[in-house]
Image: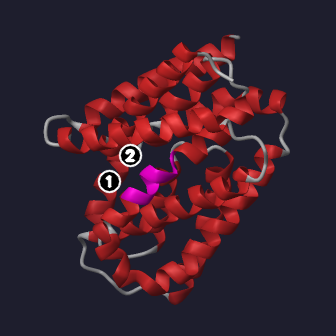
Amino acid sequence: MLEGWEYVWIGIAAVAAGMVNALAGGGTLITFPMLTAVGVPAVVANVTNTVALCPGYLGATLAQWKDLKELKQRLWLYVPASVLGGILGGVLLLNTGERLFRDLVPYLILLACALLAAADPLRGWLLRRTGSGSSAQPASLGVWAAAAVFLAAIYGGYFGAGLSVIVLAVLGLLLSQPLTQLNALKQAVAFSVNIAAAVFFVFSGQVLWSAALVMAVCAWVGGTLGGKLASRVKPAVLRGVVVTIGVIVALVYLLR
C-alpha cells in the first residue's frame, strides 16, 4: 500500500500522461517511472499502468468509430491478432521475473523514445504515401499486416510504450487506406492489445488496484484537459519534451 503523498505523485503523473497522450502520445514514459519511483516493483508497475490506461484507449477508439465502421473486414482480421498478441505479451511479462525486467526497462524506454521521436517523420511519409491515390494492393499484404500486428501486439502486451507508432508504421507500409483510416485501425489495434493484456493481468494478482484507480481517474482528467489545449500546444514540441524526459529516465535506470 502506498502512502498518501505517493498517491498524489502518481495522480499528478497520470494527469500529465493523460494530457500528453491526448496531444502527442508517450504518456507511459511519465507514469511508469513515477510508479517505480514511489517503490512499486517494475513488473507490478507495468501491469498496473496497463490496466489504468484502458479508459483512455477506449475513449480514443470511440472517437474514431466513424472511420472504423468502414473497416469491418480489416477489424475481423486485426483485432483477434491484437488480442492474441497482447495476451502472449502479458504472459511473457509475468514470466520474465522482476530482476530481468528491471534490467530490460532502460532499453525498452529508449526504444519507446526512438519510436516517439520517429512519429512526425513517419506521419509525413504516410501523408505522402496515402496521398498518392493508389488503392490497389495484393490481398496477401493484408495477411502479412495481420502477422506484423500480432508481433507488435506481443511487444504491446509486454511493455506498450510506443506501440501506436509501430502499428501505424506496419499498417502504412502494407496497406493503402487513407491516413485517417490507418489512424483509426491503429487505435483499434492499440485498444485491443491494451484491453486484452489488462484483462489477463486482472486475474494475475499483480495489479496494485488503489494506484490503478487513482491513475485511471486522473488520466481521464488529463485527457480532457489535453483535448481542450490541443489548439494551443504544438504536439512536436511536447513530444520532444517527453522524449527528453524518457532518455533521462532511461539513463537513471542504467546508472542504478
In the image, 1 versus 132, the foreground residue is: 1
Eyeballing the image, is 58 above or below 118? below
Q: Disc 1 residue type?
A: Arg
Q: Are marks 1 and 2 in contact (CB under 8 Å)?
A: yes
The amino acid marked with disc number 2 is Ala
Q: Is residue 35 above or below residue 217?
A: above
> Which colour style is shown?
secondary structure
Residue occupying image coordinates x 53% and y 51%: 163
**Residue 182's quadrant in the figure?**
bottom left
Residue drawn 29% across the image and 75% down it: 66
State the count of labels. 2
Q: Which residues are magenta?
A: 53-59
Q: Which residue, given by chain and number where applicable, does mark 1 sit on?
A: 123
Tell me the residue that label 2 is attached to.
119
In the image, is residue 182 part of the stretch drawn in magenta? no
Q: Position of residue 74 (x, y in %)?
A: 48, 81
Q: Is residue 132 left or right of residue 118?
A: left
